[in-house]
Image (cartoon, rainbow, N blue to C red):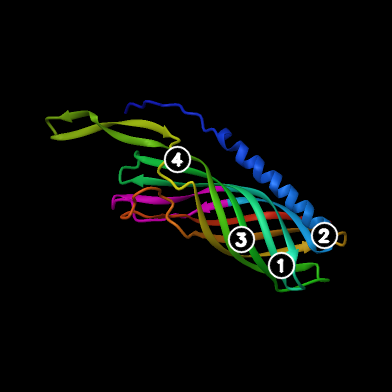
């Protein structure tokens, strides 16, 4: 087997200005809200894992899709509407991974998609203050901006083969590739999500909690004329979050 490696840098620098604008707008928004409703606002930071489970009809029968684990990290806030209901706004960096395997285990491709995710939703607290243990349900919509795409794997080179006349068989050399082309994907899409979580609060307004979400893309992730193909992103995220009330 002969492998040729094409080395490409996986760079997100072109999106720095977009992220900077979002961060500035977020700081201004948080500052204005906190100054008016500080007693009803809580802030949080979260980190966790992402299991990508895309739903697609674009692969042949001899190929199978496997879920891989990525990561998510972000900041968020919530506004307590009443004792049970709260509005939540997050901004997260999400890296989702999945792989496609051929019938030949040597032929496979791993995909990594990095998104800026902005979920907006509501929470319903099953147990409220002054209880320290507060489980909740959540649901909402998220806007996702594609920051980077990477495909890495091997494929048979049909122009580089060997024919065994005695056995009557033909074998192909495998080529290695890395691609960061984003043109085949949408630059942004929307998703709906739902989940559960819980938090354990201390007496000094700090808490630690866990949260699990399931998100399903509402639009095909493929760009251009893809009437016969579909690729809907599905994410299962689980993470730990730290929360406090200013």
Q: Is residue 53 magenta-colored?
A: yes
Residue at 53% x, 48% y: name it.
69
- In space, the residues marked 3 and 1 are separated at their CA atoms by 17 Å
Residue 35 is labelled as: none
Q: Earlier in the sequence, mark 4 or mark 1?
A: 1
The mark found on residue 86 in the picture is: 1
Q: Alpha carbon of mark 4 to alpha carbon of mark 1: how far?
A: 36 Å
Work out whether mark 3 precedes mark 1 in sequence or the reverse, and give the earlier one. Answer: 1
Q: Are marks 3 and 1 in contact (CB under 8 Å)?
A: no
Q: Main secondary structure of the magenta part?
A: strand
Determine whether the residue tagged by mark 4 lies in a helix, strand or loop.
Answer: loop
Q: Disc 3 designates what residue?
A: 212
Residue that carries the numbered disc 2 in the rendered image: 36
What SS does tag 1 mark? strand
Residue on which the image places disc 4:
182
Measured as percent of width and height from the top left, residue 78 is found at 73, 61
Report if the CB atoms under discs 2 and 3 are less than 8 Å apart.
no
SS assignment at label 2: helix
Which residue: 65% across, 45% down?
A: 22
Q: Quadrant of residue 175?
A: top left
Quarter that holds the C terminus: bottom right
| Count of numbered marks | 4
- Circles 4, 1 touching at the beta carbon (< 8 Å): no
User: Which-is-in-front pick, marks 2 and 4?
Assistant: 2
Q: Which quadrant of the rendered structure holds the N terminus? A: top left
Residue 237 locus on image (x, y percent): 58, 56
Q: Nearer the viewer, mark 2 or mark 3?
A: 2
Q: Which residue ends up furthest to the right in the rendered image?
A: 204
Lower sequence index among marks 2 and 4: 2
Chain-order first, disc 2 or disc 3: 2
- Numbered range of the magenta stretch: 50-70
User: How many C-alpha atoms fall within 10 Å of the one at disc 4: few (<14), some, or many (≥20)?
Assistant: some
């Amino acid at each position: 087997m002969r492998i040729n490696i094409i080395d490409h840098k996986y760079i997100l620098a072109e999106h720095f200005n977009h992220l900077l604008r979002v961060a500035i707008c977020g700081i201004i928004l948080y500052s204005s809200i906190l100054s008016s409703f500080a007693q009803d606002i809580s802030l949080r930071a979260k980190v966790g894992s992402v299991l990508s489970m895309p739903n697609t009809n674009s692969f042949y029968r001899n190929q199978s899709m496997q879920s891989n684990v990525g990561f998510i990290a972000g900041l968020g806030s919530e506004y307590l509407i009443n004792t049970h209901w709260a509005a939540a706004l997050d901004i997260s960096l999400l890296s989702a991974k999945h792989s496609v395997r051929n019938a030949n285990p040597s032929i496979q491709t791993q995909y990594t998609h990095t998104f800026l995710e902005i979920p907006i939703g509501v929470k319903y607290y099953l147990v409220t203050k002054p209880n320290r243990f507060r489980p909740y349900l959540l649901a909402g919509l998220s806007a996702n901006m594609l920051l980077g795409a990477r495909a890495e794997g091997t494929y048979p080179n049909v122009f580089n083969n060997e024919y065994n006349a005695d056995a009557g068989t033909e074998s192909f050399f495998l080529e290695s590739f890395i691609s960061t082309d984003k043109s085949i994907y949408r630059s942004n899409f929307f998703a709906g999500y739902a989940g559960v979580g819980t938090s354990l609060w201390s007496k000094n307004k700090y808490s630690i909690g866990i949260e699990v979400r399931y998100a399903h893309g509402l639009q095909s992730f493929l760009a251009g004329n893809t009437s016969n193909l579909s690729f809907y992103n599905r994410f299962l995220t689980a993470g730990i979050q730290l929360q406090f009330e200013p």
